[in-house]
Amino acid sequence: MAAAATSACHAPHFVLFAGMQRYCFPVALLLLGLAPVLASEQLVYFGTYTGAKSKGIFLSRLDPATGRLTAPELAAETTNPSFLALHPNGHFLYAVAELDDGAGKGNGTVGAYAIQAGTGKLTPLNQQSSGGGGPCHVAVDAKGKCVLTANYGSGSVAALPIRPDGSLGTPATIIQHTGSSVDRQRQAGPHAHFICPSPDNRFALACDLGLDQVIAYRLDAELPKLTATDPGHAKVAPGAGPRHLSFSPDGKFVYVISEMSSTITVFRYEAKSAGMREVQTISTLPKASSIPSSCAEIAMHPSGKFLYGSNRGHDSIAVFAVEPKSGKLTALQHQSTQGQTPRHFAIDPTGRWLLAENQASDSVVVFGIDAITGNLKATGQTLAVGSPVCAVFVQEHP
């Protein structure tokens, strides 16, 4: 059956996070460099923008030993499932339907699906309002009690309860962001682009591209409820347009990728208050580059040693080394994604493979990750998927 690798840890263990997945290995084995490699196949679900080449969520299987992907098959037919999130128990998948009525309030939805054992196909459970228009991001809290959504069109965030059967209740909390920033075209109003729980599940952090802010909310996943915090938010440079973020494995740093300025800002994170203090801002582009570009996805390697960010226009993955004490980044590589518009990429839970989803060229390209240097190398494998914009891994067990 398909399940996330969240088995109970015995004795001292180290937990690797990849998206919403947790992998527990004995500390002694990690220190000796003998942590087991996940040998069984991993299911990979691809979210897409639907059209002539896509009808919804697609499914493939990754061999973690070789990086080979099977031919994609349609797992669920649905409209614009542009972002996906996995329940911690590995049995349920959630997908936004990125819709907007054009008036800013929208008719976006988020759908719940059960993952069928053996086949990996998705059984629709239900759909609920996402709490606004143009939902572009969804996340599940660590306890599997609620779904969080970010609505780009309406500039709002919401929390929806997860029922025991995996289906969703109506939004229990909807928070409308207000304000603007310096770019009159892109930032005339709020545009919530991302929301995720903090590592301790006590807070939720939201990136609002229209406000140039990362907003922190206290999270009560049981209700579920989002409430304002003090200091409440961190700022990036005016006009930067924060899009997504990633935590360091130890939870001490937050890395925010800004779409409009093609930069990553490093914040030191205070777990008790969700306060953030800027440490560094660094470009995601080579110094000599003059190609118009914008950023999209950001992800930390499971080891915590490397950070990756995607450039659309430059069509590359920027690779950085992470200094563990300061959290600061050093640029290592800019690897072509061998396609156009890498809206998203995903690192598999073993940390050996990176899948780059090239939205404009309808392709998913597999790269190997050097465990020592963090650099990427193309494997020569390309998968045809119509307008791919998200990938989520699920560990499959015999």
Image: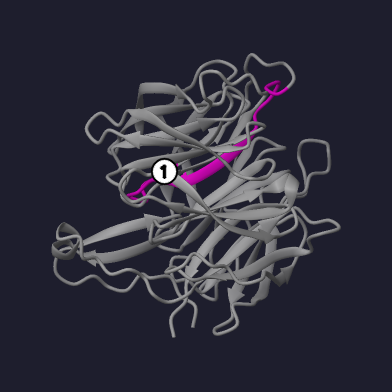
Q: Is residue 333 magenta?
A: no
Q: Residues within 10 Å of mark 1 (few under 14, many from 20)?
A: many
In which quarter of the view is residue 119 placed? bottom right
For residue 126, above or below residue 360: below
- Residue at 55% in and 85% down: 118
For residue 372, above or below residue 51: above
Q: Say which of 192 and 394 sits in front.
A: 394
Q: Is residue 187 magenta?
A: yes
Residue type (three-letter) at the residue carrying disc 1: Asn
Quarter of the image with the C terminus is bottom left
Q: Is residue 309 left or right of residue 341?
A: left
Q: Would you say residue 367 is visible in this rendering? A: yes
For residue 144, above or below residue 118: above
- Residue at 59% in and 21% down: 289
Residue 66 horizontal/vertical position (percent): 46, 67
Q: Say which of 345 and 243 sits in front.
A: 345
Q: Would you say residue 169 is visible in this rendering? A: no
Residue 155 horizontal/vertical position (percent): 65, 35
User: Range of the magenta residues?
Assistant: 186-204
Q: Which residue lies under the disc numbered 1?
A: 375
